[in-house]
Amino acid sequence: MYDNISDNGYHIREMKRDDMLELTRRMTLSRNCFHRIAGAYFDSDGYVDGTFNTHFLKLSKPEQKSKLEVARAIPFAKTNVELREYRFLPDAGKQGSVWQFLKAILDSEMKNDAMLETFYEMFGEQYQSDRDYGIYFFLGNYDIPRKGADKANQWESEEVYRFLICAVCPVDSHYEPEAPECGFLFPAYRERGAAEDYIDVYQGIKHPEFLKLIGVD
């Protein structure tokens, strides 16, 4: 599907709602697709107050449920309205780009704390908020089931889609997250696979600086 140019000049592609629903069906306690969760807490000036990084299943069941709701809010948002697919800038792969950071975080399976902390610092310098907030990263794997000639899902896996979900949420005095204001799914999920040159960006509340700091075109 071809790119369109949005009113603000960004290259976007129309998304399929079924693609996102396919992913969210694997984001439940019984069918959990997440392996790790990591993130950072920021004050309203963008300074990091603390970080965390752990295996998702080490969370208590109530914590797993509440964090799954945070993660699901990104792909479950209104497609092509709140959730849009953007193309990265042509020089996205250059040293120090956000694309490179996200690819490295994904390839390290979110176990490289130094890489994550560098991203948090860069994010805090640019993101604008009048409240304390948190960044929540989720690492997921989805075994894409093979489809037969009748388009019905088969048991065997065709390929594995490995992805990051990021949610940026205001937090209360106990660091509990509220509904995400923005976030993304990387790489974009399209035609039952990864589209690494694209990212699905959620904006429940408009943050113009968010698109710029991600580095989309």
Image: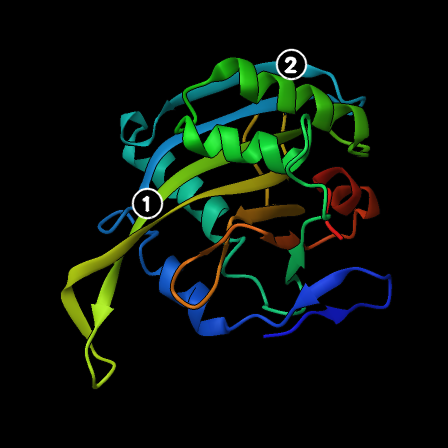
Location of residue 53 in the rendering, given as x and y in whole percent from the top left corner:
43, 20
Q: Residue furthest right?
A: 8
Q: Is residue 108 visible?
A: yes
At x 78%, y 52%, the residue is 206
Helix, strand or loop at mark 1: strand
Query: Circle 1: is it few (<14), some (14-19), or many (20+) Cα within 10 Å?
Result: some
Q: Tell me if residue 174 can be seen.
A: no
Quadrant of the rendered structure where residue 129 is?
top right
Residue annotated with mark 1: 141
Front position in the image: 125 or 101? 101
Residue type of the residue flagged with mark 2: Asp
Q: State the residue in front, 177 or 161.
A: 161
Check disc 2: other Cα within 10 Å, few if <14, some if 14-19, many if 20+. Answer: few
Q: Are marks 2 and 1 in contact (CB under 8 Å)?
A: no
Residue at the spot x=79%, y=24% of the render? 125
Left or right placement of residue 98 versus residue 161 in this view? right
Residue at figure coordinates x 22%, y 50% from the top left: 30
Left or right position of 37 against 78 = left
Query: Residue 55 appears in which quarter of the rendering?
Result: top left
Q: Is residue 79 above or below residue 66?
A: below
Task: Give me the C-alpha separation between circle 2 and circle 1.
Answer: 29 Å
Q: Earlier in the sequence, mark 2 or mark 1?
A: 2
Q: Write the residue at 60% across / 33% down.
A: 100
Residue matched to label 2 = 49
Which of the two residues, 151 or 172, is positioned nearer the viewer here? 151
The amino acid sitting under disc 1 is Asn
